[in-house]
Image (cartoon, rainbow, N blue to C red):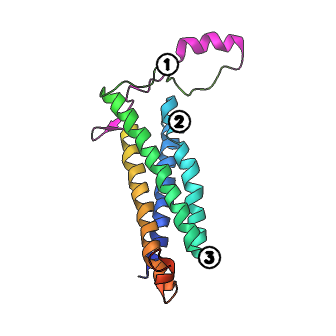
Amino acid sequence: MSLDRLAQSMTSLVLLGGLAVIATAWGYQLIGGYVPCELCLQQRNPYYAGLPLTALALLLMLRGRTGLAIAVLVAVTAIFAYGSGLGVYQAGAEWGFWDGPKDCGGGGSAPTSASDMLGALKTTRVVSCTEASWRMFGLSFAGWNAVASAGLALLALGAAGVLVKRRPEAGSKDRSKDSIVGA
């Protein structure tokens, strides 16, 4: 497999993996009835920013714009690393390793009328950022998001690294022109 194809495959995995993660989050909310807390909703933002940028990086690679693709993949890496940090922060707060945000409440919808408001007050449960509503193998949604986001960040960084490694092959015959020492 050529380095171009490897970088494209890795970037495609970032895109497909990220889509699977955000679709799972939405599925648990819409089908499973889980109400996300404010910090949970914030953890979705890196996907909303990172996935379109990942698609852009893939498009740039297909058009031979390797330098721009590398820059976009580095940005994607930073975005998903930030998302992983948010997941670690919330998971640590859920385990009681540190305090979570004091103002973190649920992401439910607002009542449509005053009469609905009284009924909503009786049935609405404020979702805390420090209580895990679900765990699998000891990790909550936030913990799994930390793992998934870190994996996506590493995969994007790896794709950028493959492109950096590939660039000199298609570059000039005399690489000394590109270095500071050779100038």
Is mark 3 in CB contact (under 8 Å) with mark 2? Answer: no
Q: Is mark 1 on a helix, strand or loop?
A: loop
Q: What residue type is labelled 2?
A: Leu
Q: Please say if 175 is above or below 96.
A: below
Q: Crowdedness of circle 3 by 10 Å Cα count: few (<14), some, many (20+)?
A: few
Q: What secondary structure is marked by label 2? A: helix
Query: Of all residues shown, which one is farthest toward the left?
Result: 137
Find the distance from the CA under tag 2 to the CA under tag 1. Answer: 17 Å
Q: Circle 1 is placed at which residue position?
A: 125
Residue 129 coordinates in the image, percent (x, y): 43, 27
Residue at x 43%, y 82% (from the top left corner):
2
Could you tell me if residue 14 is visible in this image? yes
Left or right of 130 in this view: 97 = left
Q: Which amino acid type is shown beneath numbered disc 1?
A: Arg
Q: Sequence-wise, which precedes: disc 3 or disc 2?
A: 2
Name the residue beneath numbered marker 3: 63
| Residue 41, numbered circle | 2
Residue span colored magenta:
112-140
Comparing 28 with 162, the one in front is 162
Left or right: where 105 falls relative to 157: right
The amino acid beneath tag 3 is Arg
Q: Residue at position x 36%, y 48% from top?
A: 147
Please state which of the two labelled residues, at mark 3 or mark 1, is closer to the viewer: 3
